[in-house]
Amino acid sequence: MIDNAALVHRVIDEIWNAGNIDLADQLFAPTYINHGGLIPDLVRGPEGIKLSVALYHAAFPGLHVAIDDLRVDKDAVTLCWTAGGQGPDDGAGTVPARMRGKLSGVTSSHVVNNQIQESWTSWDAPLVLQRLGIVEAGHEETS
């Protein structure tokens, strides 16, 4: 039996940082749902995690997630993290300035039977959209 802090460490170290996406089948419940990020409620199950990791690594080569703080309260795990990586180059071998820098966020997860059942992520989504060139700086999406 793995403790909840060790489980979240494995998600960050082995899935997000090392790219071992097949581990998602073990660490995420088949019914997993992520209620945050760029596409809230659309990342479902281990396959959703695998796709999400692959997409973020394609958008930000060299992506690395650092654990800033990790707190466990029974089946709830709160992770404060910082992510960084370079965006794709502009074809001339340089990375646009908007793609540089780090991003911080918080992910709260509900863990049952050694699997993450659901999570909620809070971060600066408009900043990521700006860095990807989807929205212009100073422009915020409205819902």
Image: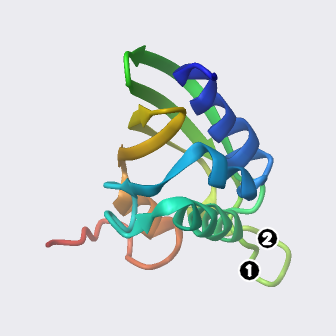
> Residue most toward the bottom?
91
Q: Quadrant of residue 64?
A: top right
Q: Quadrant of residue 127?
A: bottom left
Residue 94 located left or right of residue 123: right
Element type where label 2 sits in the image? loop
Residue 63 located left or right of residue 128: right
Q: Which mark is residue 90?
A: 1
The picture places residue 65, in percent across and down from the top left corner, at 64, 40
**Amino acid type of the residue that numbered disc 1 sits on in the rendered structure:** Asp
- Residue placed at 68% from the left, 34% from the top? 10
Q: How many marks?
A: 2
The picture places residue 66, in percent across and down from the top left corner, at 64, 33
Q: Quadrant of residue 50?
A: bottom right
The picture places residue 2, in percent across and down from the top left corner, at 63, 23
Q: Look at the picture and state if 16 lies above or below 106.
A: below
> Residue most toward the right?
93
Element type where label 1 sits in the image? loop
Check contact, mark 2 vs mark 1: CB within 8 A: yes
Q: Look at the picture and state if 22 lies above or below 76.
A: below
**Amino acid type of the residue that numbered disc 2 sits on in the rendered structure:** Thr
- Residue placed at 55% from the left, 36% from the top? 82
Residue 101 located left or right of residue 69: right
State the residue position of label 2: 94
> Residue most toward the left?
143
Quick one: label 2, few (<14), some, or many (20+) residues within 10 Å? few
Q: Quadrant where the C terminus lies?
A: bottom left
The picture places residue 86, in percent across and down from the top left corner, at 71, 58
Q: Which mark is residue 135?
A: none
Q: Of 108 and 95, which appears nearest the observer?
A: 108
- Residue placed at 38% from the left, 57% from the top? 33
Q: Look at the picture and state if 1 lies above or below 119.
A: above
